[in-house]
Image (spheres, helix red, strand yellow):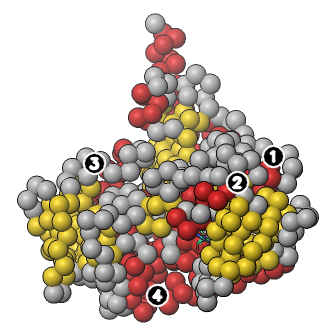
Amino acid sequence: MADFDVVVLGSGPGGQKAAIAAAKLGKNVAIVEKRHMIGGVCINTGTIPSKTLREAVLYLTGLNQRELYGASYRVKEEITVADLGMRTQHVIGREIQVIRSQLARNKVAVLQGTGRFLDAHTIGVVHEEGKETKVTAEKIVIATGTSPARPASVEFDDRTVIDSDAILHLDRVPETLVVVGAGVIGIEYASMFAALGTKVTVIERRERMLEFCDLEIVEALKYHLRDLAVTFRFGENVAAVERRPGGALTLLESGKKIPADCVMYSAGRQGKTAELCLEAAGLTADDRGRISVDGDYATEVPHIYAVGDVIGFPALAATSMEQGRLAAQHACGEPVGDMDDLPPIGIYTIPEISFVGKSEDELTRDKVPFEVGISRYRELARGQIIGDSYGMLKLLVSPEDRRLLGVHVFGTGATELVHIGQTVMGCGGTVDYLVNAVFNYPTLAESYKVAALDAMNKMRVVARLTAGM
Ligand SMILES: Cc1cc2nc3c(=O)[nH]c(=O)nc-3n(C[C@H](O)[C@H](O)[C@H](O)COP(=O)(O)OP(=O)(O)OC[C@H]3O[C@@H](n4cnc5c(N)ncnc54)[C@H](O)[C@@H]3O)c2cc1C
């Protein structure tokens, strides 16, 4: 008899949902987690702190109110890291309590320490004082996540040259900031600091950023960020970062030298598998620390599963949770469905971006015809009321069967609004549903109806001309 039916390594979104799903199926479950990390990267250093920081920035700077009250409007003149940190710490504290309470209610044992495999069914839990406890399990779920990748050539000091973990512990809001890497995390932080008044320079090796997003929306984001004094250096490589008294010099291969108070590297993430002693269980990880799994999230050792960021793309809290639930159900012999193949993407830049389904570029590449329906917030009463004149919603509609092929939203509430489109798409709905539906007024959701009518009108013109031929 094993000590537990299921042992989960890591209490981030993937681990939590795996543990709770197994407990709901009546299993005896334990979760192994290091001290001070309940909730994982999601709660402690990633999603929740960054999204709370964004909310604090938007509130304190009054940025979203300036269209109505003027360019000088601010809630607080001098915004300090204490102002920002207060809200972040409050939310983190509350979220940790919620998770602890959910685990306790579901009778999931929390074993504090670093887990490692001793064999394929035995986990050693190394406590802070170095003592090791052994636990055995029928099934094991690895949900140990990732940490920021740190290029060996760069000397990080957590003050001047930092990664996305250390940015939460700066002792002051920098006047100038270099962000290396224009991925989601890099651009989210670039936009938050730009909103605070920091002069930000973004350096990106590729010629474009957020290539998986709608091009028109990325262009709109770039325009907004430039308006907040962000400088983009695309197609540039960092040759070296030199720490100097009072700041750092970023030297580019092109010969440019960029001075800044602080340099944040956002250069991808590394799977946290080094401490796991995977070989003791007959497992391996790739050079980025990732573990490969099959469609049920089982590793090559069938009773050991892996979920969340440690298995790689898409590496989101949203998808990690669902992978955890599905893996636990499979491990416990419960019938499972597949994860819906319409995952939404939310990017919490300022302004925010969200989409579901295909982009114009993808459809064009695949030779799938589509019509575009657009609604601009400035033509919606709600857009005027909230002072958002730049927001837009774009529907990509199939002229053949009128199904929605993609929904792309930019501006206030984008990450919430996208779910209306996701639901219509997921239920096989067509643009006709949106044309005929009555939406609350005045809302931003009304943009779906406006965009649907726009697409219908364009399709009608094509149909008329085609019929007349
Ligand atoms: C700055 C930032 C912003 C983000 N924003 C978003 C967002 O807006 N939306 C979104 O969906 N996603 C976002 N993400 C991604 C999201 O945080 C991750 O996808 C999610 O946290 C992954 O969950 P996980 O369960 O795989 O692992 P994690 O949350 O990384 O948790 C893994 C846990 O395992 C523990 N662990 C590791 N090794 C061991 C061991 N040997 N023994 C015991 N415990 C161990 C760690 O201490 C950690 O607590 C963001 C990430 C970052 C960094």
Q: Secondary structure at mark 3?
A: loop
Amino acid on which disc 4 is placed: Gly
Q: CA separation, marks 1 and 4?
A: 41 Å
Q: Which amino acid type is shown beneath numbered disc 2?
A: Tyr
Q: Which residue is mark 2?
A: 305
Give the image quadrant in which the ligand numbered 1 is located. bottom right
Q: Which tag is nearer the camera, tag 3 or tag 2?
A: 2
Between marks 2 and 1 in the image, the one whose residue lies nearer the viewer = 2
Rendered image: mark on residue 336: 1
Does residue 144 appear to the left or right of 468 in the view shown?
right
Q: Is residue 439 visible?
A: no
Q: Residue at x 43, y 75 (%)?
A: 165
Of pointers 1 and 4, the one earlier in the residue sequence: 4
Foreground mark, 1 or 4, reads 1
Q: Is residue 54 left or right of residue 102?
A: left
- Going from N to C along the chain, the mark reached first, 3 or 2, is 3
Dot 4 crowding, Cα within 10 Å, few <14, some 14–19, many 20+: some
Residue under label 4? 85
Specify whether 255 is left or right of 118: left
Q: Earlier in the sequence, mark 3 or mark 4?
A: 4
Q: What number is the disc on residue 206?
A: 3
Residue 406 spot, x, y in % from top left: 54, 40
Q: CA distance from mark 1 to mark 3?
A: 40 Å
Amino acid under disc 3: Arg
Label 2 to label 1, Cα distance in Å? 15 Å
Quick check: can you spot residue 243? yes
**Disc 2 to disc 4, how far (Cα)?**
36 Å
Provide residue 7's location: percent of width, then percent of height: 76, 66
